[in-house]
Image (spheres, rainbow, N blue to C red):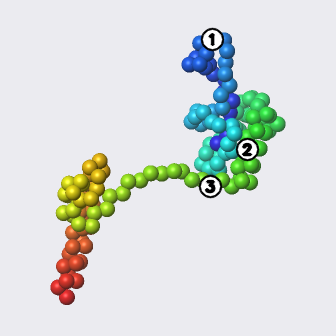
Amino acid sequence: MQWVKVMRLARAHNPDPSQEVSLPQCPICRTELNEQRPMIPNIRMDNAVQTHISLSAQFGRVDWEPTGKRYLDFVKRKEYAHAVEHPSLVPLTCTLFLATDRDAASKDRSTAGHSASCPKPPTNHALDWVDEMYSEVENLSSEE
């Protein structure tokens, strides 16, 4: 990602349209950015940003030419991010449902030891097929 100063009106905070406020934004997704934090390396985003920069310089934007202020700021931040080597981690949340017994899974959650606010597990027909396969294997092993 790169940092871009985009001039736009801040009508929510200032009703006077003659005053413009400079806010840092991502040129790709237009998300407001925090200038105090370095960039996190991302190959796909880097390629998109490089294309954006080269097109900006090609169409005559002085700030994005190789000696321009924005370009030099971008290169400085990019080199700093690669030197620090921040991990490219994205926080994910995941809800897992595990039922070892089909009868226990179908009982009321409050009686099965779960809180009443616990969501009901999703129906997955692929898991039903796997359960049938394992029950057949267990039947074969118990017959031996």
Query: Residue 77: which disc?
Result: 2
Q: The N terminus lies in which quarter of the figure?
A: top right
Distance Cα–Cα, label 1 vs label 2:
34 Å
Query: Residue 87: which disc?
Result: 3
Residue drawn 67% across the image and 22% down it: 21
Q: Are marks 3 and 2 in contact (CB under 8 Å)?
A: no
* Vertical order, 101 against 110 (above or below): below
Label 1 environment density (alpha carbons within 10 Å; few <14, some 14–19, many ≥20)? few
**Residue type for callout 2:** Arg
Look at the numbered disc 2 and give the secondary structure of its residue: helix
Residue 123 locus on image (x, y percent): 25, 54
**Residue 74 is drawn in which quadrant?**
top right
Look at the numbered disc 3 and give the secondary structure of its residue: loop
First in residue order: circle 1 vs circle 3:
1
Q: Residue furthest right?
A: 67
Q: Left or right: 110 with respect to 27?
A: left
**Residue 71 is drawn in which quadrant?**
top right
First in residue order: circle 3 vs circle 2:
2
Residue drawn 62% across the image and 12% down it: 17
First in residue order: circle 1 vs circle 2:
1
